[in-house]
Image: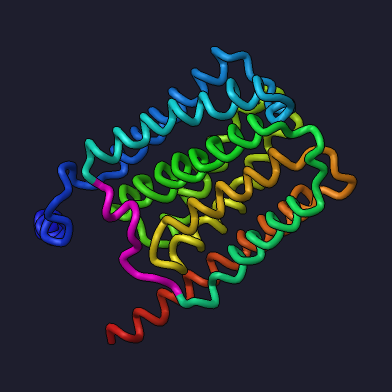
Amino acid sequence: MSNNKDMLQKSLNPALRVRPRVSWGVLGYFLYIAVFYAIFVLNGVDYRRLGESEQTLLLWYVAPMSGGAVLAFAVVTIYRWWRPSLVERRSLSRWTMTLPIIMMVIAIVNMLIGDFSHVTSLMWLYLIVGSILVGFNEEIIHRGQLIVALRSRFGETGVWLLSSAMFGLFHLPDMFLGVGASHAPFQVMMSFGLGSIFYLARRSTGSIVFAMFLHGLWDFSVISHGVSSFPIAGISAPLLAIAAAITVPIILRREKRRTGDQSV
């Protein structure tokens, strides 16, 4: 039975150099963590001061993201998983774009009400470059190659749950880098929820590109925000995370029921 499954998978993805397995996806995930946090530690990051100056943005934002981009690009290229990492095999209904669109609007409003008087031209450049790399890196690792690997063994609910949980745990080491042990578990749970919205962005559009854009836009909005008296993104993020954690399993259950009815 497993041989037939392997042959079917190979026929569907004839250009893949490495047959998708969970272990390969997890390997790419941990390699990215190693490279990313190694640069963080070497540069002496303080996560709370990330957007403070030109130097902090260069050393703590652009530098680790650049190293991570090299690693992410190398992993997917070696595996030859570009197409399944970038293109969704089956899209969800268009209405499931609701949460990603709300998140996008909040990020834009957050920037419109922000105080950017301290942001220099070079800081804007570093923010743009770093945010583009954030969107590419973290999506191609968590919602790209990891989803390809997880689908070789799990159903879609398990794929969403595990990829979002691993995205949340990816932020756990921040407790040693300025976030603090008391706040780190909250950040992990919030990242799980926001990662679920990025998952919806991929599934609802049929491509990971919108998820990359949304992820980069969100981080750009949060890091560049400055000292506005009402940081709407920070306040609404927990609500978005809770909404996603509740709605995504419901959406996937409805999708499973619909595809089952169609097959019958």
Q: State the colouring used for the structure image.
A: rainbow
> Residue at position x 66%, y 55% from top?
241
Find residue 85 and report its horizontal and vertical position in percent: 33, 51
Residue 204, above or below 116: below
User: On the picture, is 216 further left or further right than 15?
Assistant: right
User: On the picture, is 248 further left or further right than 92?
Assistant: right
Check residue 88 for magenta coloring: yes
Quadrant where the N terminus is found in the figure: bottom left
- Count of labels shown? 0
> Residue at position x 36%, y 30% from top?
71
> Residue at position x 52%, y 40% from top?
134
Residue 161, above or below 67: below
Residue 58, above or below 26: above
> Residue at position x 76%, y 54% from top?
112
Find residue 115 and report its horizontal and vertical position in percent: 82, 43
* Magenta residues (range): 81-92
Check residue 153 for magenta coloring: no
Instruction: Give the camera-side residue of 36 and 18.
Output: 36
User: On the picture, is 42 further left or further right than 186?
Assistant: left
User: On the picture, is 48 further left or further right than 135?
Assistant: right
Residue 99, above or below 37: below
- Give the image quarter of residue 99: bottom right
Instruction: Give the camera-side residue of 120 and 195.
Output: 120
Quadrant where the C terminus is found in the figure: bottom left
- Give the image quarter of residue 142: top left
Whether residue 94 is visible: yes
Query: Which residue reaches farthest right?
Result: 229
- Give the image quarter of residue 50: top right
Find residue 12 and report its horizontal and vertical position in percent: 16, 61
Whether residue 176 is visible: no
